[in-house]
Image: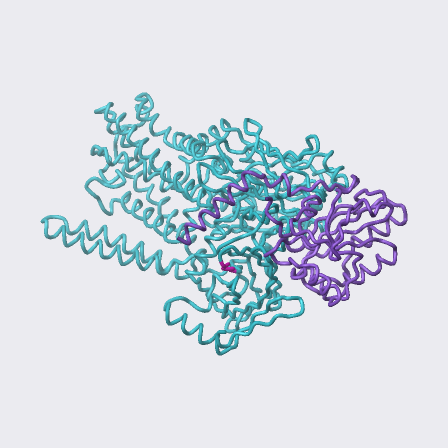
Amino acid sequence: MQSLTRQTFIAGLTLAGLAFPAAAFAQGAAKVGAPAPAFQAVDVEGKTRNLSEFAGKTVILEWTNHDCPYVRKHYNSATMQTLQKDMAKEGIVWLSVISSPQGEQGHVDAAKAKELTVQRNAAPAGILLDPNSKVARAYGAQTTPHMYIIDPKGTLAYMGAIDDKPTSSAASLEGAKSYVRQAIAELKAGKPVSEASTKAYGCVVKYAPLS
Amino acid sequence: MRHGVRVIRDGDGIMRLHFGKRFLRGAVLAFGLAAPGLALAAESAAVTSPRVTATLLSSRDTVVPGERFKVALVQKLAPHWHTYWLNPGDSGEPTQIRWDLPAGATAGEIQWPAPKAIRVEPLVNFGFEGTVLLPLEITVPADAKPGENFALKAEATWLVCEKICIPEEGSFSLDLPIAAVSTVDQAAAARINAAIAALPKPAAFRGKLRDDAGKLVLDLPGLPAGVADLRFFPVSDTLIEHAADQPLTAGDKPFLTLTRSSAFKLEKPEVTGVLTFTETGSPRAVTIVADADAALMAAGGAAAPEARPAVVRIPMPAEGADLTLWAALAFAFAGGLILNLMPCVLPVLFIKALGFAQLAHRNRSEVREQGLLFLSGVLLTFMVLAGAVIALGALGSSVGWGFQLQSPPLVIGLAVVMVLIGLNLLGAFEIGTSVTGLGDGLASRGGRLGAFMTGVLAVVVATPCTAPFMGAAMGYAVTQPPVIALSVFMALALGFALPVVALSFAPGLLRLLPRTGRWMLVLKQAFAFPMFATAIWLIWVASVQSGPQGVLAALVAVLAAGFAVWLVGVTRGSFARRAFGSVLAALVVLGAGWFTVQNAIPGTATEARAGDIEAWSPERVAALQVQGKPVFVNFTAAWCITCIANERVALSRQEVKDAFARLGVVYLKADWTNRDSRIAKALAEQGRAGVPLYLFYPARKEAQAEILPQLLTVDGLIAAAERAAGRNAKTAALP
């Protein structure tokens, strides 16, 4: 009986795989130099946020999952919080995005998300709850963390890793090059972003199945 | 919670597992009792979590100073969990090992098995499920002291994921006693060798990566027809979108269409990766190198490629991979023809020819019939050999021509065959319808079975030899689909059989031979000596492979074989006597056979180190090139007669040594006497399936090697050395 259900499940998965070729949605529309994909999501305060409301401001999207060891590396060492605060000082809007659906690692409700922010002394301007993984699909987010920078004109200026040390070991933070800081500094100086697209690293983003 | 196991979760959420000593000892003891005969020394204590059971496995129980041996990190994964390949795909991190080895010891890189694409919709990971062995090579320093322990210590970290990911780490340690003779742990070695055999082998062709309207196109010239389910796994994680489909466009110019990574970056003009596919239903994996075209390089932001030094080629059939089928067939045929002249083959064939001459005076049709029977013996034996090479290749084993000589018992078996033929030629024994067809004596009519068996035997005695032209053809054959590989082997067989068959069909040629007389008997006896010489050489090969035990085993086998044929000879007559003789002879042979297998264990000989010749490794070649030194690499094996001949006539000559010294050439030797996957891989990269192979690397970083002919000459070698050193003969001659 149990094996039968498992078979059915696997068959279902296979069918789902056939019906939606992976490439169709693994690759989001996000492309450096092109307008950043529009999104609409509810934040932890229950407000619906649109990308368009941040026109004229630089926006940073941070995909996160508080239980992911790679995310923990950046929060336990306070590097992520420091980065958030430094960006806030520059007038940059930092939005953390949580795309894990119900039942998957990293899924939180609004109350838990706020609690985590207090507990970790984090400083995002907002936290977007994306339990249907819609924003993640729009951007093609692959890992936690996965970082996106949108310039004041709404153009995607950076997408990729948070730094150049793709490991979960805390020791790697020392001497790591922050791609986010580098891109922001270059944008501020009016220069093109030298490394505008890097390979993100971390835990896989847990996607909600397409319904 | 099991007694003695502590799980520590640190600040990073990293699970660290520690075992109490008492628990370990208990577990090891229980394991040892449950599975007696398993050597515990060759596997470290396990590091376990609910997801992974990891151990460090060694192919040796004891090691000798200076030897290289294989170890593997074994990860046994719980169902649905995976660890990662070198490029983990859309997320993840590959397993890493940090070694803490005794001074002077070195550990090689992990030899990565072919990855699987593990879907985590809509993304994909590249990694391993089930049980994975990550093999690598350890070198024991030459000054290690016998009697002490060789302590292998490793810290490994790996990320294990189902949907959620857990970074884990473990400490592994193995103490291997240093001894005068190394002991192979058969069970562990078998597991590691199987893992190494399953590693992806270099493809016989180079790919080409180009841009096609924003898509990446990977041209795969030389991709065998009829393959399916192709997937390209790049080593670089910034080349392609990993989860995207990779449609194959088949035809005479097959290519894969890939999707450019959003973080596209090309660091080198050479793109490497693994190509997995199924061929006639069975899974295959090859490593592939593709050259990115200039437009793509510019898009990838990499510096313009340095003008790559063109591969210098001496007009010799050097690169199997470049051969067309027809050329390979022609080379194989020519190689087979030349094989007839090899010292171990010639006596057998010459005697057969003399037999024909004898017979021709009486019955021409029978000579023709025997010629054809000889041909079928040759063809069948080559077919069996080709089948073995192809089957082992399909299993992922890196074998080449001469692979059978990597097994000491087979080498010894061949030595016994040589001795028996020699004894027979001398007339020390006669067998009714002799296996060899020689015992019939020259005057009697050779039996049909005899003619067939002569064909079989001729191929068997020819196996230690590589004739010119053969290397390239064999190299081509083993990289091709079975039908083509078989065709090449058949061409070789036809070339090999041609002289004898032609003789049987051309009465004119036979008439040229003098009439039977005493000279024939003398010649027959004289031919015994090349056979004995071949036996001596084979026993020397066994000594290199298995050390003193190998020599003992070989000589015991020869003694037993001689005794057995003598016994059968003297117990002729009544049925009872014959039965007694046969049974006793069979017992002697069985006993000696058992003794041989017990004692002739590969890899127990210490590596012979000759003066200023260094052991080869790809890293050493690269390092020397960076230092601006020309490098000569001699891919050889004790069982390769052509290799030894080249060493005698060219490599060990004083003029060559002087030239090498003058030009600062570093001489590296890759010894393939025993199986070595790295050497097999390097051979395959040059389109070869066997030795000899001689490469001259110019004294420039990453410059391509020049392939020298299979038959070396002093002048050719010195000229090649001068080219590699960047000098021509004239300037080098100036004071």
Q: Name which quarter of the figure residue B101 lies in.
A: bottom right
The picture's colour for chain A is purple
Q: Position of residue B250 (x, y in %)?
A: 55, 29
Give the left or right position of residue B361, taking residue B16 as reference: left
Chain identifier, colour cyan:
B
Q: Name which quarter of the figure residue B271 lies in.
A: top right
Q: Position of residue A172 (x, y in %)?
A: 72, 62
Of all residues, the one furthest to the top in this rendering is: B508
Front residue (pair A108, B647): A108
Q: Name which quarter of the figure residue B719 lies in.
A: top right
Of all residues, the one furthest to the right in this rendering is: A189
Main SS, magenta region, reads strand
First to last magenta residue range: B74-78
Front residue (pair B291, B458): B291
Which color mode does the image show?
A: by chain
Image: B221 above or below A25: above
Image: B538 above or below B151: above
Front residue (pair B406, B661): B406
Q: Is residue B205 magenta?
A: no
Q: Residue at x 47, y 43 (%)?
A: B400
Of all residues, the one furthest to the bottom in this rendering is: B22
Q: Is residue B77 magenta?
A: yes
Quadrant location of the C terminus of chain B?
top right
Residue B266 is at least partly visible in this image: no
Residue B438 is at least partly visible in this image: yes
Q: Position of residue B338 (x, y in %)?
A: 44, 33
Give the left or right position of residue B443, taking residue B171 as reference: left
